[in-house]
Image (spheres, helix red, strand yellow):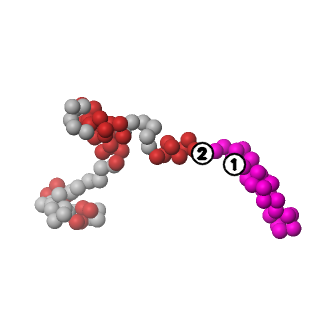
């Protein structure tokens, strides 16, 4: 930590290439994942490579699992209508179903 340029981290270092401290740049997670995947694909004999590559296979991300569970508008409306029928809320209470 002491070797990092605090001014660069705060985007105000005026020394640039003449600064005596390290200017550490942010690396996006997607780039890190790609590099690690390529490294393990290039060296499959490395211990643990198979398990790490299995975790990185497409379709195992949480984002895709959430997308698979999503319902269409019609399905949601039908489900809400069923809930309304089950509850049998009297119209005098001011709730309007289907609007």
Label 1 Cα neighbours within 10 Å, binned few <14 / some 14-19 / many ≥20: few
Residue beneath the point at 69% across and 48% down: 76
Label 2 Cα neighbours within 10 Å, binned few <14 / some 14-19 / many ≥20: few
Seen in the picture, residue 78 relative to 16 is either above or below; the reply is above
Q: Position of residue 73 (x, y in %)?
A: 69, 46
Residue beneath the point at 55% across and 44% down: 67
Residue 5 in magenta?
Answer: no
2 and 1 marks in contact (CB < 8 Å): no
Q: Quadrant of residue 2?
A: bottom left
Q: Position of residue 14 (x, y in %)?
A: 22, 63
User: In the image, which residues are magenta?
Assistant: 71-99
Task: Say which quadrant the C terminus sits in.
Answer: bottom right
In the picture, measured across the screen, residue 31 lies left or right of residue 20, that is right
- Majority SS type along the magenta span: helix
Residue beneath the point at 17% across and 58% down: 22
Q: Which residue is mark 2?
A: 70
Secondary structure under badge 2?
loop
Seen in the picture, residue 18 relative to 34 is either above or below; the reply is below
Asked if residue 99 shows in the view, the reply is: no
Seen in the picture, residue 23 relative to 94 is either above or below; the reply is above
Residue 95 in magenta?
Answer: yes
In the picture, measured across the screen, residue 82 lies left or right of residue 4, that is right
Residue beneath the point at 78% across and 59% down: 87
Please give the label number shown on residue 47: none
Marked residue nearer the N-terminal end (2 or 1): 2
Spatial CA distance of label 2 from label 1 is 10 Å
Q: Which residue is mark 1?
A: 76
Q: Position of residue 17 (x, y in %)?
A: 17, 55
Asked if residue 61 shows in the view, the reply is: yes
């Amino acid at each position: 930590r002491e070797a990092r340029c605090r001014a660069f981290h705060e985007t105000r270092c005026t020394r640039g290439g003449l600064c005596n401290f390290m200017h550490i740049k942010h690396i996006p997670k997607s780039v890190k994942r790609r590099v690690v995947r390529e490294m393990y694909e290039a060296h499959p004999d490395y211990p643990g490579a198979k398990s790490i590559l299995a975790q990185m296979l497409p379709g195992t991300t949480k984002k895709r699992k959430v997308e698979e569970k999503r319902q269409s508008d019609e399905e949601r409306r039908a489900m809400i209508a069923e809930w309304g029928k089950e509850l049998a809320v009297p119209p005098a209470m001011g709730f309007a179903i289907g609007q």
